[in-house]
């Protein structure tokens, strides 16, 4: 197929997804800035109108009796990541006039782990399984909207880590040991990365995308939030490091997908501990995300207009 045919085939596929996503709820039914909920408010979706999707799987606090406690796997909550995400929505809207898509799991992790395959995530509870499905349906709806609007999108799976080293960890589905490779060698692994789709639309090389001067790590570090990987810390230096989990693998970098992204693991102190620090971190994230989209996706978020949306739909 020629490029134009591929594009229109992709659009038809997207249009079908749009029609049937989320149990028949068409994308047009979601209004940007409004909050939508799954059964019993376990999953919350803040609909967006910019090609940015933020998922927050471990910030929930609900412990309904109808769902038994999980008995195996990781049970720790990522404290205040839900509050950081809500601060991000507010800062993004103030800065750009638009909304990112944000999906929050409001169940505590002991009830549902929204960053695992369903068996480990829900451990047999039908209500937890339903919430897990709604979680992914909302993310899929957000991704469909981003692709329809901009042809691609940035997915971020937001977490909090408890590692001693107080820095952000960006997981691109590239292990800590692979990060030690030079840029020429690491390029061989780009197709397994959550940035795979982005490598096809940007002129920036894969190693540069991970830790060059316009990498996400560089943009956040320039705003006072040290990151690995970044120009200063190109690899994890033998320290514990999260390279990206289930959501990042499932929702970014797929061979058949247009969405790229990463797992963002935040240290506690100075990032998510106080309201003031969360506001500061949220603003740095907004600046970094909008710059990243402009540099690598050729998307100017504050210039996205309804005409752009219409043009994409008519393409
Ligand atoms: Zn987590």
Image: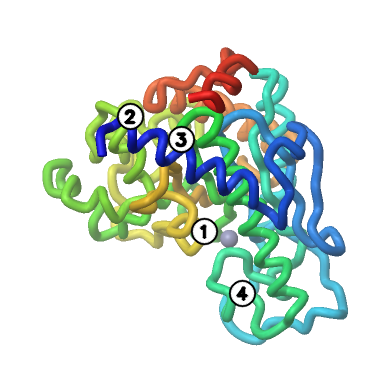
Give neighbour class at mark 1: few <14, some 14-19, many 20+ (Cα, 10 Å): many
Mark 2 and mark 4 lie on one chain; the one further toward the N terminus is: 2
Q: Secondary structure at mark 1?
A: helix
Real-space CA distance between mark 3 and mark 1, rounded to the nearest whole angstrom: 17 Å
Determine if the C-beta at disc 3 is less than 8 A from ligand 1. no
Determine whether 308 is above or below 13 in the image.
above
Name the side, left or right, on which 38 lies relative to 168: right
Residue for badge 4: 121
Residue 4, which numbered label? 2
Give neighbour class at mark 3: few <14, some 14-19, many 20+ (Cα, 10 Å): many
Q: Nearer the viewer, mark 3 or mark 2?
A: 2
Name the side, left or right, on which 297 lies relative to 158: left
Q: Quadrant of residue 23?
A: bottom right
Residue drawn at (70%, 34%) of the image: 89
Residue for badge 3: 152
Real-space CA distance between mark 1 and mark 4, rounded to the nearest whole angstrom: 12 Å
Residue for badge 1: 247
Real-space CA distance between mark 2 and mark 4, rounded to the nearest whole angstrom: 40 Å
């Amino acid at each position: 197929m020629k490029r134009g045919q591929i594009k229109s085939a992709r659009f038809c596929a997207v249009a079908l997804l749009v029609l049937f996503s989320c149990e028949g709820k068409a994308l047009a039914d979601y209004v940007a800035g409004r909050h939508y909920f799954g059964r019993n408010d376990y999953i919350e979706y803040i609909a967006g109108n910019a090609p940015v999707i933020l998922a927050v799987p471990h910030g929930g606090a609900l412990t309904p009796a109808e769902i038994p406690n999980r008995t195996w796997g990781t049970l720790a909550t990522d404290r205040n990541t839900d509050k950081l995400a809500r601060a991000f929505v507010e800062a993004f809207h103030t800065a750009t006039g638009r909304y990112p898509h944000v999906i929050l799991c409001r169940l505590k992790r002991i009830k549902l782990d929204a960053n695992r395959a369903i068996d480990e995530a829900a451990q047999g509870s039908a209500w937890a399984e339903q919430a897990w499905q709604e979680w992914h349906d909302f993310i899929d709806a957000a991704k469909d909207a981003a692709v329809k609007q901009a042809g691609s999108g940035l997915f971020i799976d937001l977490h909090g880590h408890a590692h001693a080293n107080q820095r952000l960890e960006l997981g691109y589905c590239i292990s800590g040991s692979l990060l030690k490779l030079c840029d020429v060698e690491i390029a061989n692994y780009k197709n397994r990365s959550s940035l795979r789709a982005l490598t096809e639309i940007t002129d920036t090389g894969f190693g540069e995308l991970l830790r060059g001067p316009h990498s996400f790590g560089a943009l956040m570090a320039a705003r006072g939030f040290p990151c690995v990987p970044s120009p200063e810390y190109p690899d994890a230096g033998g320290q514990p490091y999260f390279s990206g989990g289930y959501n990042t693998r499932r929702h970014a970098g797929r061979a058949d997908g247009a969405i790229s992204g990463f797992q963002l693991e935040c240290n506690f102190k100075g990032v998510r501990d106080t309201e003031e620090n969360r506001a500061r971190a949220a603003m740095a994230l907004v600046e970094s995300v909008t710059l990243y989209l402009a540099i690598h996706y050729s998307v100017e978020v504050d210039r996205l207009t309804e005409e752009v949306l219409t043009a994409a739909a008519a393409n």
